[in-house]
Image (spheres, rainbow, N blue to C red):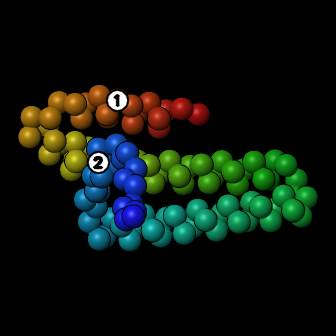
Amino acid sequence: MTTEPMESPVHEASCRKSHQTPEVKKNLATRLNRIEGQVRGIRGMIERDVYCDDVITQLAATQSALNSVARILLDGHLKGCVRDRLLEGDDEVLDELTVTIQKLMRK
């Protein structure tokens, strides 16, 4: 009896790849490393019973940094992926973009 690996149902969009330039990837990695450090710092602040307002200030800074990463990704997505798909006649990308923007607007 042979067992073949089961294929998991993967949404078509999940198979697509980003087309960020090496410079943008490096920029994003740097930003994400900084955010990772901020999150560790926040955890340490909580463990040390730092005043709540100071922790909240750091949380706001971290959220702002994450929003900056999202803006960079969205900009590249619009100028690359979305534009290319529209040029290929794929208007479905507009519905996908609407959902993406709605996700970013949730807070």
Q: Left or right: where does residue 13 sit relative to residue 92?
A: right
- Is any atom of residue 17 visible in this view? yes
Q: Quadrant of residue 17?
A: bottom left
In which quadrant of the rendered image does the C terminus lie?
top right
Could you say where residue 68 lies in the image, as x and y percent from the top left?
Answer: 47, 51
Find numbered disc 2 in the image and state the secondary structure of the residue it sits on: helix
> Can you say whether 78 is above or below 26 in the image?
above
- Is any atom of residue 75 visible in this view? no
Q: Nearer the viewer, residue 14 or 56?
A: 14
Q: Left or right: where does residue 32 sit relative to residue 86?
A: right
Could you say where residue 76 lies in the image, as x and y percent from the top left?
Answer: 28, 51
The residue sitting at the front extreme is 1
Q: Quadrant of residue 19?
A: bottom left
Mark 2 = which residue? 77
In which quadrant of the rendered image does the N terminus lie?
bottom left
The residue sitting at the left extreme is 88
Tell whether label 2 touches label 1 (CB within 8 Å). Answer: no
Q: What residue do we see at 84% from left, 58% from top? A: 46
> Can you say whether 1 is above or below 105 in the image?
below
> Can you say whether 42 is above or below 90 in the image?
below
Q: Nearer the viewer, residue 12 or 107?
A: 12
Find numbered disc 1 in the image and state the secondary structure of the residue it sits on: helix
Q: Nearer the viewer, residue 38 or 3?
A: 3
Q: Nearer the viewer, residue 4 or 53?
A: 4
Amino acid under disc 1:
Thr
Q: Left or right: where does residue 55 sit relative to residue 85?
A: right
Q: Quadrant of residue 47?
A: bottom right
Mark 1 = which residue? 98
Could you say where residue 39 lies in the image, as x and y percent from the top left?
Answer: 67, 61
Q: What residue do we see at 58% from left, 62% from top? A: 35
